[in-house]
Image (cartoon, helix red, strand yellow):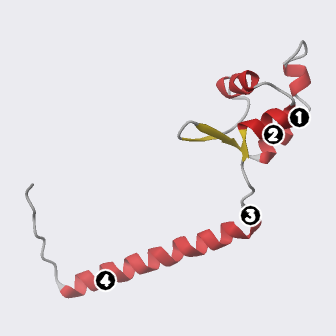
Amino acid sequence: MNMEIVSIEKKTFEMMVAAFGALSEKVSALRRKSDTGRMERWLTGEEVCGQLRISPRTLQTLRDRRLIGYSQINRRFYYKPEEVKRLIPLVGTLYPHGR
């Protein structure tokens, strides 16, 4: 493994450290802002199936057809509560002969 050494002027290094500190403060401020309730808790697939009274396979079909928004972390899917609320009146019309 080759190790390269980069030499920079002290003033440049201090400016980089200050810029990183400012960025770190902005990230911390955004995290505090989101922790105050602006971001709702995301629901798991199990919770969504329970609220909509659908099977996991039907939930997968909703994802496949892009009828419900989601985020995926590793192999787990998460859903915003407003997405689930939006679908409640539609589930019966989307799947009238069983879910």
Which of pointers 4 and 1 lies earlier in the amino acid sequence? 4
Disc 4 from disc 3: Cα separation? 33 Å
- Determine whether 16 is above or below 45 in the image: below
The residue wearing badge 2 is 84
Q: Is label 3 in a helix, a strand or a loop? A: helix
Q: Earlier in the sequence, mark 4 or mark 2?
A: 4
Query: Residue 88: which numbered mark, if any?
Result: 1
Q: Are marks 4 and 2 in contact (CB under 8 Å)?
A: no
Residue shown at the point (68%, 28%) measured from the top left: 63
Describe the element under mark 2 as helix, strand or loop: helix
The Cα–Cα distance between marks 1 and 3, rounded to whole angstroms, is 23 Å
- Identify the residue position indicated by label 4 in the image: 15
Q: In this view, does 47 lie above or below 31?
A: above
Q: What kind of residue is marked 3?
A: Arg
Circle nearer the N terminus (1, 3): 3
Q: Is residue 1 left or right of residue 46?
A: left
- Taking the spot 64% from the left edge, 73% from the top edge, the residue there is 32
Q: Are marks 2 and 1 in contact (CB under 8 Å)?
A: yes
- What whole-number distance in Å separates the C-alpha atoms at marks 4 and 2? 47 Å
The label nearer to you, 4 versus 3, is 3
The amino acid type found where label 2 is placed reads Val
- Locate residue 65, reporting x and y percent: 68, 23
Between 60 and 50, which is closer to the camera in this rendering? 50
Q: For this view, does 85 lie left or right of residue 13?
A: right
Query: How busy is the neighbourhood of tag 1: few (under 14 within 10 Å), some, or many (20 plus)?
Result: few
What amino acid is found at the position of numbered circle 4 in the picture? Met
Q: Residues within 10 Å of mark 4 (few under 14, many from 20)?
A: few
Q: Where is residue 21 in the image (x, y as percent from the top left)?
A: 42, 80
